[in-house]
Image (cartoon, rainbow, N blue to C red):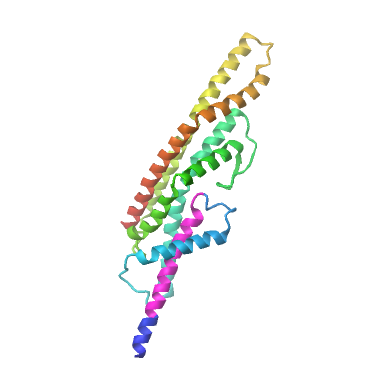
Amino acid sequence: MLSLASSVADLAVEKIEFFILALIRIATIIFLLPAFSMTSVPTTVKAAISFLLTILVFPQMPLVSFTMANSPVFFFMLVLEQVFIGIVIGFAASFLLHFIAMGGEWIARDIGLMQGSMNPFTEFQSNIYSIILTILLVVIFFASGGHHFFIRVLFESFQYIPIGNFVWDTRSFAAILIILSASSFVVAFQFAAPVMGALFLCTVSLGLMNRVMPQLQVWILGIPLKVFLGSLVLIYSLPLMVQIFNANFEQLQRALFAILRAGRG
């Protein structure tokens, strides 16, 4: 009878340990996801969301073929595994917004308005164009239900990479993250290209006017003209920017599932 009670107690403790491991992976991802990584989002809110998602995910987790065997070292290794998986997925998801900040910096540089403040999403000093574009596209992202995909990734990460079955081949993850990083530059250029092109033509036109009429202070005229023209082209380019954002999100989806497949081996 005592042995049966002891077995039941060990099973309950092991269930709690697996729940903690799942919570660690999910919490690491949540704390690194775009929008949730902001310091303005209270830690208690992030922790509550992580705990709620773990409650939903835990009953659907696949069965494991090993026991903890009351080994603190083995449990600690499993904790490191969940943290690493969460960091890789969360870091890859952060590329959803990197190109917006980069493209906004290029737009502001050509317009001539580099002064700014702290971007709440990237936690870095940014100009007003980067901040406005980031906020606008994040609102569109949540309004269109794009955050449902990240919830799906949380659920399916345990199907692709069950606890204790992670393949520690960092080369695959590094290759995927390098591709995402390189593509951010390309997407950022596409994002800023309409405004940069219009401002380039404006600069060339001002240079020609200065050659024809040297007495006209075209460079003083060019400051408000660039601000007006750049902002006007930016407004009319917003539908194109949304399309680029959606295309980048689709690429990110493929990259995240590639990471999950690489972790499974």
Secondary structure that dominates the magenta span: helix
Q: Point out the stretch of residues depicted in magenta.
A: 10-34
Query: How many marks overall?
Result: 0
Viewer-proximal residue, 125 or 97? Answer: 97
The relative height of residue 206 versus residue 190 in the rendered view (above or below) is above
Q: Residue at x 39, y 82 (%)?
A: 9
Where residue 46 sits in the image (x, y, percent)?
52, 59
Does 214 appear above or below 251? above
Q: Position of residue 189 (x, y in %)?
A: 48, 33
Instruction: Confirm whether the magenta stretch covers residue 14.
Output: yes
Is residue 49 visible in the rendered image? The answer is: yes
Image point (45%, 43%), residue name: 181
Corner quadrant of residue 15: bottom left
Look at 58% across and 36% down and name the residue there. 129
Furthest-front residue in view? 143
From the viewer's side, name the closer residue of 241 and 98. Answer: 241
* Quadrant for the C terminus in the image: bottom left
Residue shown at the point (48%, 48%) measured from the top left:
94
Whether residue 6 appears in magenta in the rendering, the answer is: no
In-front residue for pair 139/207? 139
Residue 235: which quarter of the image?
A: top right
Taking the image as shown, residue 193 lies to the left or right of residue 109, namely left
Can residue 70 be seen in this snapshot? no
Q: In what quadrant of the picture does the N terminus appear?
A: bottom left
